[in-house]
Amino acid sequence: MIQEIIPLTRPRTLAAALGPTILGAAFSYYAFEAPHGTGLAIFHTILIFIAVVSAQIIANLWNEYKDFKSGLDAGQKIGNAGSITRGAVTPELIITMIKILMTIPILIGIYLSATITWYYIPAGFICILISFLYSGGPKPISRTPFGEIASGIAMGFAIVLITGYAWSRELSWTLLIPAIPATLLVGSIMLTNNIRDIRNDESHGRRTLPIVLGRNHAIGLMSTSYLFNFLWIIAWIYVGALPIASLIAILAAIPAFKTIATFYAHTDEFKLDGAMSTTAAAAMLYQLLWSIGLIIGK
């Protein structure tokens, strides 16, 4: 049973939760003071990470459930866990798991709201709403060209700001420096998924971003996004807002452009599945290495 449930959580997408949390904390450590102490800020960061990972798993389970109910999984060769379609896991079990897991971010959210700011409640509600509307509702966001930006805002931009506020207790424009790349990196994970699944999505009437733009333009958009993120760090180092040690994040270009090369070399879904791993690696490596650079440069 466990071996069937784990793929349902889509482990590779969990980098989308870990990266922005670490980056938000590291940037805040570098740029701001922690008025209530570094130890408490780290503790709050760990709680935020647990809440975000739980919410991401819930969103992934919900996405699998909705894809099964809509029939999208029936003709899909790869990309979904397939456990529900094969009957190894029942839809009822998935809903039960979602209900149980929901208690984790709710309880953590209430605690953080009571100890930091009650504004976390509406912020968290909006993120959860986006996550559920991504796959559910009368017009799921995942079937439109706005899936990448919606997931980027909920799982990248918002997480950096929430984590940053837990450290500094202020909402500074400076947090846009890590928040914008985090948004694009989460979006790139979703874009990779949609480029890989373009044939199946199109056959089911979806209008994802790669379908609207066309496959080559979608790959070009991803390349531009990666290039922007690397130039972004260089530009902020040049103006003195970041330590030169942040340049270590440029090493993420290796898996990033391996993803692009994979897309240009293959069109088969099975061969393209490797691009999901390199995209997740690029997102994780970029944010982790940048975080290390910020801590070294403090």
Image (tube, helix red, strand yellow):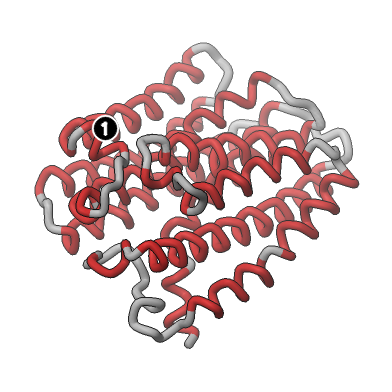
Q: Please name the residue shown 66% across and 34% down the image.
A: 161
Q: Quadrant of residue 173?
A: top right
Q: Nearer the viewer, residue 140 or 225?
A: 140
Quadrant of the drawing holding the C terminus: top right
Q: Furthest-top residue in view?
A: 239
Residue 131 relative to residue 28: left or right: left
Q: Which residue is mark 1?
A: 223
Q: Nearer the viewer, residue 99 or 169?
A: 99
Residue 62 x %, y % = 51, 62
Residue at (56%, 31%) from the top-left corner? 179
Q: Residue furthest front?
A: 138
User: Label 1 amino acid?
Assistant: Ser
Q: Residue at x 58, y 18 (%)?
A: 241
The image position of residue 100, as x and y in percent, is 68, 72
Q: In the image, what residue occupies the spot 33% across and 43% down? A: 191
Q: Nearer the viewer, residue 85 or 226?
A: 85
Answer whether residue 292 is visible to the viewer in this image.
Answer: no
> Picture coordinates of residue 21 (x, y %)?
61, 46
Foreground pick, 251 / 209:
209
